[in-house]
Amino acid sequence: AAASAAATTAAAASKSDADDCPGRVPFHGLLTCQGSVYQQWQARIMYFHWKKQTAAAGPCGDMGGFTRLVASEGGKPDGLEAEMPSFFVRQYTTAEIARYGHFGVLNRPFSVVQFADRGGFEALQEQFVYIAETDHVLMRPLPNLATPDKAAAFSFGYMHCGSSHQPLLDKFAPGVTYSDVQPVGPSPLVVSKPVLRRLAPLWLNLSLALKLDPVADRRFGWVLEMWGYSIAAASLGVKHRLVRNFQVEYGASAGRIPPEFPTLSYIFHYTYGIEYTLQGRPQGVMQIGEWSLDKRHYFGALPPKQLAPPPHCALECAWVLLARSTRPRTSSEVI
């Protein structure tokens, strides 16, 4: 009876939202991560900005609920569940992941499959999901960019499929041609729940199979799991709207960056370090700068509460990321 009453209340609230906000198509934020210190501090920053942009969008914005989907040892809580809504699934054991070269990112599709198998999608009121990563900083409210039949994803410059990929497609996805594969990955992504449920098992299975194949492993490298997703989508006929301003991935050598870029794109994905000499020149390829803002410095420990400002003539991206990534003690603390 209690469950029925709760469902009735949720349905009534949903109808009220639809009546008050015509055209609103809410989506649920699903932050895929592991329970490591490295990803915990990033998750706090990500969730802070999720809440900030949800508030900025107002009650008629499309940003809805939020779940941190955590792959942890044995599926045990990691201590942050009091700060943000969290759903725990087991990560691959050391022995299991060793078979795949300790490629930990395989826990991402594994966690989504477990979430689906345990009724996670059915528990979400929203009919769409935004798959996020811990190093995503939302810079403005995110609208629902997808439709029931067409997902929305970022177009990655390093994910273009060509004729040289065809032998691997023939082996792992018979019937798929290279022109069918879009330059996308599983994040950032907005997708309907039925499409994601259909995609997740094949995304996982293809990623595992590609990793075990020496030729595919060498060819796809550190983005192999992204290729697992894009090939799975092509195999199932899932199409994506390519959203070029979904995110930016700026570094010190990005060239001219418009100072207003936080109002032009939705996400700052700080996947690359920002490295400068103290004179404000880019430090150089694969070199740590005299001034450095790089998440990889803090694998096993929290970053300091305050970081030194960048050199005066550093690109705008350094100042923007510094301001938005200063570590909160909790995800509720004003940065």
Image (cartoon, rainbow, N blue to C red):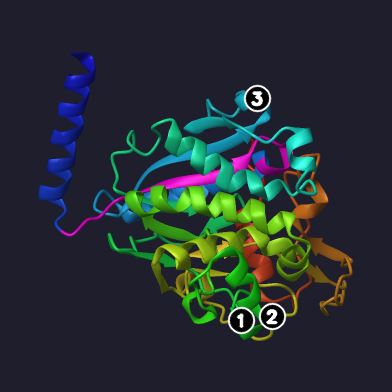
Q: Nearer the viewer, residue 42 or 6?
A: 6
* Front: mark 2 or 1: 2
* SS at circle 2: loop
Instruction: Work out which residue is located at the far left of the displayed protein and give it.
Output: 19
Above or below — where is 172 with respect to 63? below
Res 17 visible: yes
Indicate left or right for 312 with 127 as reference.
right
Residue at image mark 1: 257
Residue drawn at (47%, 77%) of the image? 180
Find disc 3 in the rendering and name its residue.
74
Q: Give the image quarter of residue 178.
A: bottom right
How busy is the neighbourhood of tag 3: few (under 14 within 10 Å), some, or many (20 plus)?
few
Q: Which of 210 and 43 is in front in this view?
A: 210
Where 6 sits versus 268, above or below? Answer: above
Instruction: Check contact, mark 2 vs mark 1: CB within 8 A.
Output: yes
Real-space CA distance between mark 2 and mark 3, rounded to the nearest whole angstrom: 41 Å
Q: Position of residue 230 (x, y in %)?
A: 53, 65
First to last magenta residue range: 23-39
Whether tag 2 and tag 3 are in contact, CB under 8 A, the answer is: no
**Residue 316 lies in what quarter of the image?**
bottom right
> In the image, is residue 250 part of the stretch drawn in magenta?
no
Amino acid type of the residue tagged 1 in the rendering: Ile
Q: How many residues crowd around disc 2 within 10 Å: few (fewer than 14), some, or many (20 or more)? A: few
SS under mark 3 = helix
Q: Residue at x 46, y 60 (%)?
A: 189
- Disc 2 designates what residue? 254
